Image (tube, helix red, strand yellow):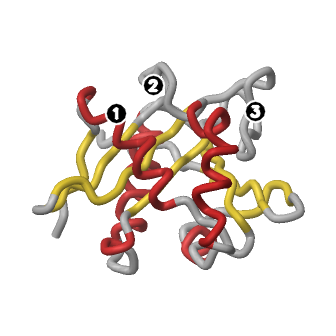
Amino acid sequence: MPEIREIKASERHFLDEILREAAYFPDPSKKQEKLTKLHPVLSSYFENFGREGEIALVVETAEGLGGAAWTRRFSNEVSSHGYVDDETPELGIAIKEEWGNRGTGTRLITRIIGELSAAGFNRVSFSVDKRNPVVRLYHRLGFHVHSEGSNFDTMVKNIEPPVIAE
């Protein structure tokens, strides 16, 4: 089973690479064209990564890195599709195709939510294309639609505070 661990500073370029590789487009033949147009938006997810509330985890396999999940806090001035408010980190997740449908996404999301809880965050958001089959996973993990767009929904999950043993 692949290991989930914190990303190393030398691996941060992988976040951008895996997002581009795993990006969902209903018409795959237009993927490269759309990614080129989206470059300025996508790069905002990774520039100067490592600020407060930003967490990145990777899936390490015997063959190398197989996926990642990360969070980034945006502001009203610099927001994204999944922006809810300045205090709610936005989740990004991308997994190589060969590691899909093996529970890897569930493990990554569960782990990063635990990290957010430990850091004191109350909820997490993200944007997802309504046509993407992975939406079922997000509903199963307790996310709900916060706001609807024409093709994208912004979803939110409330995070329970960590249980402190006495």
Q: On the picture, is 132 further left or further right than 2?
A: right
The residue indicated by pointer 3 is: 85
The quarter in which the N terminus is drawn is bottom left
Q: CA distance from mark 2 to mark 1?
A: 8 Å
**Which secondary structure lies at badge 3?**
loop
Residue at 66 percent of width and 28 percent of height: 74
The residue indicated by pointer 2 is: 49
Viewer-proximal residue among 105 and 100: 100
Query: Residue 126: where, in percent of width, then height?
Result: 65, 50
> To which quarter of the image does residue 73 belong?
top right
**Which secondary structure lies at badge 2?**
loop
The answer to whether the residues at label 2 and label 1 have Cβ atoms under 8 Å apart is: yes
The residue type indicated by label 3 comes to Asp
**Which secondary structure lies at badge 1?**
loop
**How many callouts does the rendering have?**
3
Residue at 34 percent of width and 68 percent of height: 104
Q: On the picture, is 38 further left or further right than 77?
A: left
Tell me if mark 1 has few (under 14), some (14-19) or many (20+) residues whose alpha carbon lies within 10 angstroms of its own.
some
Residue at 14 percent of width and 61 percent of height: 63
Q: CA distance from mark 3 to mark 2?
A: 19 Å
Query: Residue 91: where, in percent of width, then height?
Result: 55, 46
Query: Residue 98: where, in percent of width, then height?
Result: 31, 74
Is residue 17 placed above or below 119 in the rendered structure? below
The residue indicated by pointer 1 is: 12
> To which quarter of the image does residue 62 belong?
bottom left
Is residue 150 placed above or below 17 in the rendered structure? below
Tell me which numbered mark, 3 or 2, is placed earlier along the sequence: 2
The residue type indicated by label 1 comes to Arg
Tell me which numbered mark, 3 or 1, is placed earlier along the sequence: 1
The residue type indicated by label 2 comes to Phe
